[in-house]
Amino acid sequence: MFGKRGSFGTKDDMGAGQRAAASVAPKPAPRVEAASIPSSSETSRLDAASQPRPPEPPKATGQRGRSEEYYDTKTSIFSALIDTIDLSQLAKLDPESAREEIRDIVNDIIALKNVVMSIAEQEDLLDDICNDVLGYGPLEPLLARDDIADIMVNGAETVYIETEGKVHQTPIRFRDNQQLMNICQRIVSQVGRRVDEASPICDARLPDGSRVNVIAPPLAIDGPALTIRKFKKDKLTLDQLVRFGSITPEGGVVLQVIGKSRCNVLISGGTGSGKTTLLNCMTNYIDTDERVITCEDAAELQLQQPHVVRLETRPPNLEGEGQVTMRDLVKNCLRMRPERIIVGEVRGPEAFDLLQAMNTGHDGSMGTLHANSPREALSRLESMITMGGYALPSRTIREMIVASVDVIVQAARLRDGSRRITHITEVVGMEGDVIVTQDVFVYEIVGEDANGKIIGRHKSTGIGRPKFWDQARYFGEDSRLAAALDAAEVVDSETA
């Protein structure tokens, strides 16, 4: 029955249909060596995730209300599939062809085993098995959804997701912690990294740029913990942020002017506040003839300009050697003739090198950092420079910050899950030993509605001529800036 698919090789002279039929009778566990942890990129997608699950006490229900019998049937059919196909031949097919071949064989196995299933259950089973062999197993349906911001796997039995700013538990589960660990290894191996007992912490990324963090036993006590920060397939723009209410139209124009005028920008915010999304939005206004170099721990920025060089840090190897830090990347990219330097996240002594770059002809450089207010962002910047071992007086460091940073954009996730740009703040100068800032736009919380949604408004502080006005005029953006600030004052007066 299986002989019609010539693209698959067989493991011996017995017909594939005979082997599938023979799998109905009791027999030793199928050989799945070919599906164990891969040694090359060709077979990295076919790992030990397919091994049969040991007997467990019955549980209530699994994914989407699936019973334990569903998983037992899936394990039995999967074992017959792995014992039937030649995985080395499967690895040579493109994903779509391989998926079709697997579906055909599984349908034949279901018929030979006389498994009674509804059409919907059979389709679910086919998708699950294809995902286990070719994809990321139970994670595939979550990765396909564009409304999910985060996927949090706390061991094989517990999976949470974040949608619309709120965290919810899902019924999705893995067969066991070994399957989860194999999927983690599959993800990180695609970017040349590893996760095991010797190196139990790993940062990686998916092909679409989504950020991945894995922490494995023995550090994670209850099984591997996998966290995926997903990015939308359709990248957000400032216009969309305006429609979502994250910023007013006038504030959006001010951010566009800041991007086009090559102001040095720091985007500040807490975890999950949308810093990287906002950075992606602001880089849309970089001219296409500029050479841009990005430095990141896990490459997640996706700039649309044609002249972009993407750099990524590297962890140490098993001997503790070969590490390339963010500071190494920032220092090296200064020798690569950049016009703008984009640092995905400033979190250490690379802050000093980024400020040096901003102050030595690389105007328009940008970066993100964790802080809860613009004032706190400046303090954290000073602390990170001090952590780098620089024995500089505080006043000297602050003067360097004032000379380098033009604008701080503050993002926040409010308690109702909504994300707002709460401050557009410019760095004005120094008074004594204190850095002076002034807000151009702020977000003011008014109250909340009956559904618990926060009601607020963005308002202009009335500054008609911000410090970066001259820079905007140099790039021919002063008229747009003036019109946006005037319009914001009119809106404030109408809503007052």
Image (cartoon, rainbow, N blue to C red):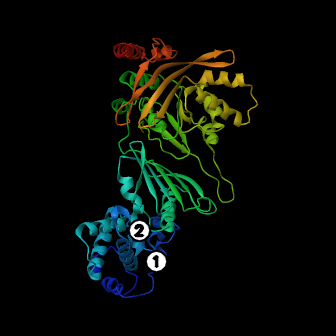
Q: In this view, does 329 lie above or below 267?
A: below
The location of residue 179, given as percent across then percent down, is: 48, 67
User: Which quadrant, please, contains the C terminus?
Assistant: top left
Note whether 76 is above or below 231 in the view shown.
below
Question: Hey, what amino acid is under mark 1?
Answer: Pro
Q: For this view, does 201 lie left or right of residue 75?
A: right
User: Of circles 2 and 1, which is in front?
Assistant: 1
- Asked if marks 2 and 1 touch (Cβ < 8 Å), the reply is no
Q: Which class describes the residues within 10 Å of circle 1: few (<14), some (14-19), or many (20+)?
A: few
Provide residue 223's location: percent of width, then percent of height: 54, 62
**Residue farthest to the front, as pictured:** 450
Q: Which amino acid does label 2 sit on?
A: Ala
Question: Quick one: 456 or 422, which is closer to the camera?
Answer: 456
Disc 1, SS: loop
On screen, residue 116 above or below 430: below
Q: Is residue 168 visible?
A: yes
Identify the element where label 2 is drawn: loop
User: Which mark sits nearer the N-terminus, 2 or 1?
Assistant: 1
The circle drawn on residue 238 is none
Which residue in the rendered view is the most extreme toward the right?
A: 391
Check disc 1 and report the residue beneath it. 55
- Number of residues whose C-alpha sits closer than 10 Å to that of mark 2, classed few (under 14), some (14–19) or many (20 or more): some
Q: Mark 2 points at which residue?
A: 91
Residue 262 shows up from this direction: no
Query: Which residue sits at x=23%, y=68%?
Result: 119
With 111 as the anchor, is 279 left or right in this view? right
Question: In 3D space, how far apart are the residues under numbered discs 2 and 1 (Cα atoms)?
Answer: 30 Å
Residue drawn at x 70%, y 36% as measured from the top left: 387
Q: In this view, does 119 lie to the left or right of 289?
A: left
Expressed as whole percent of the image width and height from the top left, the position of residue 338 reads 54, 33
Residue 102 figure quarter: bottom left
- Residue closest to the eye, 151 or 338: 151
